[in-house]
């Protein structure tokens, strides 16, 4: 397994991380036993970074990871946790809370659900518009000093917020969507992270399955939030799938799958970028791992970017209401 340094202030992690959200939430039903087997398979091949959020399945995802890690060396996994998203009993979204007292309360519950004595990377899931980022980062810094947190990360914030946060405490990484369909970070956010030597953990590298090569129109079922995703809507999905077919032709020429080419492209955009793959099954994990065997030349990358030009995606990456919570979109 290859490794990369996650920012100047962070740990060395596997070149691919495992995003665990779909094992508990958002993409419809998941198989518990297969989810745990997938986490075990990831650890066994050397994937060290496991990403979750305390609001994924309202704590279910953390408990699932805790169960998967039971009886194993705690240091085999680097656990990254997002916090602060508020949900009601029906699963609806109610905003964000990143007040210092809330930070410490959320952390206490996460430690208990995960069954660990520390979290490796702790980050607010979104910017709380009512709380200065300095206050939120300061509260996490207190938990670093107390030994409950090892490193501080950020998620979906813009360049100005990144600078303000980094002035309070070293930031190891920014978690943000980055894929062939979502390249907005290249304008301001990525240059600022590189200036400050902050790593990128890139989620959505397959655009929630849309550019995996496996997505079929109208596939989203009950409990799958992609049914409301703008890029999956009638009028947009056909245009986006046309881009996938252009990518498929390049993948075929490389003897690779569409997903592998899309993941390899993200990994090739910099040694400071770690793609997160949201595999819920071992076969999908195996496919993603195959991306590590693909060497993209400058000509390959140029051809990929001609097949899916920057800004070619039809539709926003989130519904309008959720786009409004993205400080990163105001960068």
Image (cartoon, rainbow, N blue to C red):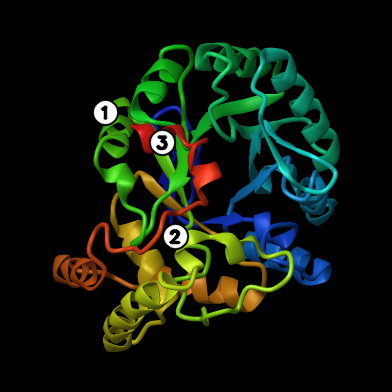
Quadrant housing residue 311: bottom left
Which disc number belongs to residue 195? 1
Mark 1 and mark 2 residues within 8 Å of each other at the beta carbon: no
Task: Calculate the distance from the C-alpha at mark 3 to the C-alpha at mark 2.
Answer: 17 Å
Residue 205, numbered label: 2
Q: Residue at x 58, y 71 (%)?
A: 285
The residues tagged by marks 1 and 3 sit, at their Cα atoms, a distance apart of: 17 Å
| Image quarter in which the C terminus is found | top left
Q: Is residue 222 above or below residue 163?
A: below
Can residue 72 be seen in this snapshot? no
Q: Are marks 3 and 2 in contact (CB under 8 Å)?
A: no
Q: Secondary structure at mark 2?
A: loop
Looking at the image, is mark 1 or mark 2 earlier in the sequence?
Answer: 1
Q: Quadrant of residue 293?
A: bottom left
* N-terminal label among 1 and 3: 1
Query: Residue at the location (14% across, 70% down)?
Result: 299
**Horizontal and vertical percent position of residue 53:** 68, 43
Res 85 label:
none
- Answer with left or right where residue 188 lies relative to residue 21: left
* Foreground label between 1 and 2: 2
Coordinates of residue 35 in the picture (x, y in percent):
74, 66
> Mark 3 or 2 closer to N-term?
2
Residue name at image x 74 percent, y 43 percent: 74
Residue 102 visible in the snapshot: yes
Judging by the rendered image, the residue that carries numbered circle 3 is 328
């Amino acid at each position: 397994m290859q490794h990369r340094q996650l920012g100047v202030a962070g740990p060395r992690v596997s070149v691919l991380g495992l995003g665990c959200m779909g094992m508990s939430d958002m993409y419809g039903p998941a198989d518990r036993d297969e989810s745990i087997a997938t986490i075990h398979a990831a650890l066994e091949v050397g994937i060290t970074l496991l990403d979750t959020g305390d609001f994924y399945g309202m704590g279910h995802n953390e408990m699932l990871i805790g169960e998967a890690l039971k009886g194993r060396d705690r240091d085999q996994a680097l656990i990254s946790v997002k916090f602060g998203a508020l949900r009601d009993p029906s699963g609806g979204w109610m905003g964000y809370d990143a007040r210092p007292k809330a930070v410490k309360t959320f952390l206490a519950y996460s430690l208990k659900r995960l069954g660990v004595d520390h979290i490796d990377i702790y980050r607010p899931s979104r910017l709380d518009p009512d709380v200065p980022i300095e206050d939120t980062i300061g509260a996490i810094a207190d938990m670093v000093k107390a030994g409950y947190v090892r490193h501080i990360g950020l998620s979906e914030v813009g360049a100005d917020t990144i600078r303000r946060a980094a002035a309070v405490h070293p930031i190891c990484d920014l978690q943000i969507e980055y894929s062939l369909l979502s390249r907005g970070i290249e304008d301001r956010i990525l240059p600022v992270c590189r200036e400050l030597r902050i790593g990128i953990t890139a989620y959505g590298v397959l655009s929630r399955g849309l550019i995996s090569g496996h997505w079929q129109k109208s596939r989203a079922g009950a409990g799958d939030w992609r049914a409301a995703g703008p890029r999956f809507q009638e009028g947009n999905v056909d245009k986006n799938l046309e881009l996938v077919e252009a990518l498929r032709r390049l993948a075929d020429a490389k003897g690779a799958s569409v997903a592998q080419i899309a993941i390899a492209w993200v990994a090739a955009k910099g040694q400071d970028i770690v793609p997160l793959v949201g595999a819920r099954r071992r076969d999908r994990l195996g496919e993603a791992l195959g991306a590590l065997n693909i060497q993209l030349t400058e000509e390959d990358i140029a051809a990929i970017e001609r097949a899916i030009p920057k800004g070619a995606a039809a539709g926003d990456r989130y519904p309008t209401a959720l786009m409004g919570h993205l400080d990163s979109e105001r960068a």
